Image (tube, grey):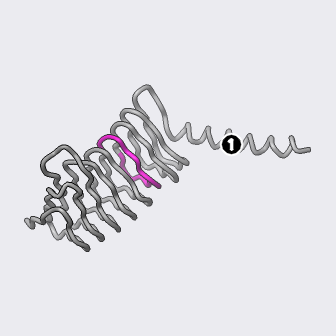
Amino acid sequence: MKLQKLIPAFMLMGAVSAANADICKQAPGSVTCGKGTVSRLSGNGMVAVNGTIVEGSTIINGMLTATDATFGLLNINGSVSLMQCTVNDSSEIKGSLSASSSKFEKSLDIFSNSIRFINSKINNNLQIHHTDSKTQEVYLDNHSEIVGNIVFDDGHGIVYVRGDSKIGGSVVGGEVVNN
């Protein structure tokens, strides 16, 4: 009797895995995801996401390029390019970030020399951690907003504020340049 109850559960798990396989295609060194929802995403190398909802964690060692996507948590070792994306949980990026028309609902921890936001928003703090670079730069362009603080751990940061962008909190360990 118990076996009869388990069979539908295993069939459902197989269907969910098959659905994830239809949304994300893996090849050596790359992952490409299209429209649909997946529970989590991981990859090494080039990862391209277009129209995908990732409910849980996204863990990537390589480069992430995403358009019109929603993520739970980002943990990226490599460069990130986001266009019209939403990140719902606190995230960490070890590499460059370019975000256009995107939103981070919680805090962002980043290890990078250069971070660019274009018409994008962080609803919490932006923490820029140590790198080997002498200066770290954050560009806020075209109505971008950091609701919380911007904190440079190394104390040598520059925030360029342009195009009606704004910072809701303070800048710690850096200076603000208004253009």
Residue 119 location, x and y as percent?
25, 62
Q: Label 1 belongs to which residue?
A: 13
Q: How many marks?
A: 1
In the shown orientation, is residue 63 left or right of residue 57? left
Residue 110 location, x and y as percent?
30, 52
Q: Nearer the viewer, residue 139 or 66?
A: 139
Q: Which quadrant, please, contains the N terminus?
A: top right
Query: Residue placed at 27% from the left, 49% from the top?
Result: 111
Instruction: Answer above or below: position of 63 versus 127.
Output: above
Which residue ends up furthest to the right in the rendered image? 1
Neighbour class for label 1 at 10 Å: few (<14), some, many (≥20)?
Answer: few
Q: Which quadrant, please, contains the C terminus?
A: bottom left
Circle 1: element type: helix
Q: Is residue 78 magenta?
A: yes
In the shown orientation, is residue 14 left or right of residue 65? right
Q: Nearer the viewer, residue 169 or 2?
A: 169
Instruction: Answer above or below: position of 126 versus 44.
Output: below
Instruction: Answer above or below: position of 101 versus 36.
Output: below
Query: Residue placed at 35% from the left, 41% from the top?
Result: 77
- Amino acid type, residue under disc 1 in the picture: Met
Query: Residue placed at 74% from the left, 41% from the top?
Result: 10
Which residue ends up furthest to the bottom in the rendered image? 168
Instruction: Answer above or below: position of 97 versus 143.
Output: above
Q: Which of the 4 image quadrants contains residue 101?
A: bottom left
- Main structural element of the magenta stretch: helix, strand or loop? strand
Residue 46 location, x and y as percent?
36, 34
Q: Is residue 64 magenta?
A: no
Magenta stretch?
Answer: 66-79
